[in-house]
Image (cartoon, rainbow, N blue to C red):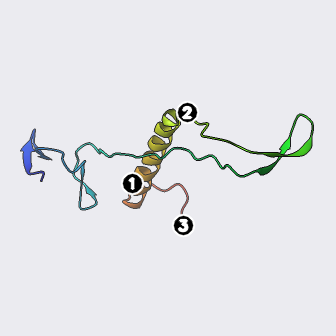
């Protein structure tokens, strides 16, 4: 429950429990969201591949998990996807002019 009030001549919510979105529409407060990332899986089955040093066909078999920390890459991906979604919404709302006319 985020009640509205007038603050500095603007309508704002007195809290941001909804994370900046009410009913799918921005309420002007900062966007907040949580992201969960599962560990990167390694396929334990033998996979055909190519050895580029010897230029021969070979097979590769992975054992265990080898991505010790995906977090540094995950942050960049989440930031990029957030920017793409917000830009798409701004285009659809007519807030950003289209470069290519349809």
Circle 2 crowding by C-alpha within 10 Å: few under 14, some 14–19, many from 20 = few
As rendered, which of 62 and 15 lies closer to the eye? 62
Q: In the image, what residue occupies the spot 70% across and 43% down?
A: 62
N-term mark: 2 or 3: 2
Tell me residue 16's x, y (percent): 18, 45
SS label for mark 3: loop
Judging by the rendered image, the residue that carries numbered circle 1 is 90
Image quadrant containing the C terminus: bottom right
Q: Tag 1 or tag 3, which sits nearer the N-term?
A: 1
In space, the residues marked 1 and 2 are separated at their CA atoms by: 37 Å
Front residue of 62 and 99: 62
Question: Residue at label 2?
Answer: 68
Asked if disc 3 and disc 1 are in contact, CB closer than 8 Å, the reply is no
Estimate the spatial distance between the alpha carbons at disc 3 and disc 1, rounded to whole Å. 17 Å
Marking on residue 102: 3
Foreground mark, 1 or 2, reads 2
- Where residue 7 appears, x then y in whole percent? 9, 41
Could you classify mark 3 by the number of other residues whose Cα lies within 10 Å: few (under 14), some (14-19), or many (20 or more)? few
How far across and down, in percent of the image, does residue 61 sit?
74, 45
The relative height of residue 29 versus residue 67 in the rendered view (above or below) is: below
Sequence-first disc among 1 and 2: 2
**Closer to viewer: mark 2 or mark 3:** 2
Asked whether, in this view, residue 91 is left or right of residue 6, the answer is: right
**Left/right of residue 77 with respect to residue 15 in the rendered view:** right
In front: mark 3 or mark 1? 1
Name, please, the residue furthest toward the bottom: 102
């Amino acid at each position: 429950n985020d009640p509205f009030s007038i603050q500095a001549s603007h309508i704002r919510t007195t809290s941001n429990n909804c994370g900046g979105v009410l009913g799918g529409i921005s309420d002007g407060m900062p966007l907040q969201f949580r992201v969960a990332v599962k560990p990167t899986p390694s396929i334990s089955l033998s996979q055909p591949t190519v050895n580029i040093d010897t230029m021969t066909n070979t097979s590769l078999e992975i054992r265990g998990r080898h991505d010790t920390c995906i977090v540094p890459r995950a942050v960049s991906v989440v930031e990029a996807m957030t920017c793409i979604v917000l830009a798409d919404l701004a285009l659809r709302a007519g807030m950003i002019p289209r470069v290519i006319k349809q």
